[in-house]
Image: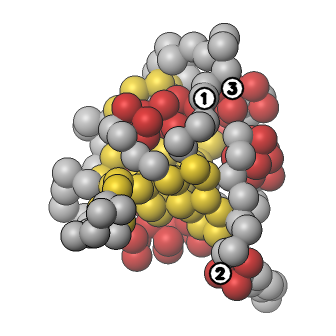
């Protein structure tokens, strides 16, 4: 897992950005999201989600989806929490934390579509007036990680927050 952040202040979506099909998820709940992650073999991401999100809907939790055009099933899901950083100071601001993006393997989205979905998530953060996006992401889906890096996510100053877990099934 790699902990990364993005300063949204100067971030801009691409000029040809198309928001079609990227929308807030109003009908999906905590159990559904966790089940999708587990079904798709993202056990580490499911564990992170379980530790960082409440099973009861709260206004600080945002969920965004992209549905597959053919089946109308969820092909991508993203989630983040909104927090007040530097509360009570002159430097008080809103940040996104626990940002996660999951691309369902059975829909095999290409890199351009993954980037479009990521940009849709970042646009939603900017619409809410958020200043930073912070995430701990697994490297299991390298195309998601690559898209995040290409949008400006980095881990400068966060290197000690990175975790490498090795395991073997027996």
How many neighbours does mark 3 have within 10 angstroms: few (below 14), some (14-19), or many (20 or more)?
some
* Residue depicted at 39% across the width and 70% down the height: 52
Pointer 1: what residue? Answer: 12
Instruction: Sort mark 1 into few (<14), some (14-19) or many (20+) by Cα contacts within 10 Å.
Output: few
Where residue 86 sits: x, y (%)?
Answer: 34, 69
The type of colouring in the image is secondary structure
Image coordinates of residue 82 in percent, x first then y, are 33, 55
Which numbered disc covers residue 80?
Answer: none
Q: Evaluate whether residue 38 shows in this view.
A: no
Earlier residue among tags 3 and 1: 1
* 149 vs 19, nearest the viewer: 149
**Of residues 78 and 37, which is closer to you in this image?**
78
Residue at the image point whose x is 53% and y is 42% from the top: 9
Vertical position of residue 69 compared to residue 38: above or below: above
Checking the image for residue 113, the label placed there is 3
Which image quadrant for residue 1? Answer: bottom right
Q: Secondary structure at mark 1?
A: loop
Residue at the outermost front position:
90
From this view, report whether residue 63 is shown above or below residue 117: below
Residue 10 can be seen, yes or no:
yes
Which circle's residue, 3 or 2, is located before the other in the chain?
A: 3
State the residue position of label 2: 161
Task: Name the residue located 55 percent from the left edge and 23 percent from the top edge.
Answer: 68
Dot 3 and dot 2 residues touching (CB under 8 Å) = no
Q: CA distance from mark 3 to mark 1?
A: 17 Å
Q: Residues within 10 Å of mark 2 (few under 14, many from 20)?
A: few
**Distance between the Cα atoms at labels 3 and 2?**
29 Å
Callout in the foreground (3, 1): 1
Q: Position of residue 156 (x, y in %)?
A: 73, 68
Q: Secondary structure at mark 3?
A: helix
Q: Are marks 3 and 1 in contact (CB under 8 Å)?
A: no
């Amino acid at each position: 897992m790699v902990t990364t952040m993005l300063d949204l202040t100067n971030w801009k979506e691409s000029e040809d950005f198309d928001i079609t099909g990227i929308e807030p998820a109003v009908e999906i709940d905590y159990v559904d999201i966790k089940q999708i992650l587990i079904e798709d073999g993202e056990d580490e991401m499911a564990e992170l989600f379980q530790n960082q999100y409440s099973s009861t809907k709260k206004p600080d939790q945002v969920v965004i989806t992209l549905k597959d055009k053919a089946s109308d099933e969820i092909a991508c899901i993203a989630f983040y929490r909104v927090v007040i950083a530097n509360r009570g100071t002159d430097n008080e601001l809103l940040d996104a934390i626990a940002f996660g993006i999951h691309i369902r393997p059975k829909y095999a989205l290409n890199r351009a579509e993954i980037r479009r979905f990521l940009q849709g998530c970042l646009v939603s953060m900017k619409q809410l007036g958020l200043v930073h996006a912070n995430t701990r992401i697994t490297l299991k889906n390298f195309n998601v990680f690559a898209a995040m890096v290409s949008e400006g996510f980095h881990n400068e100053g966060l290197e000690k927050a990175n975790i490498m877990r090795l395991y073997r099934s027996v």
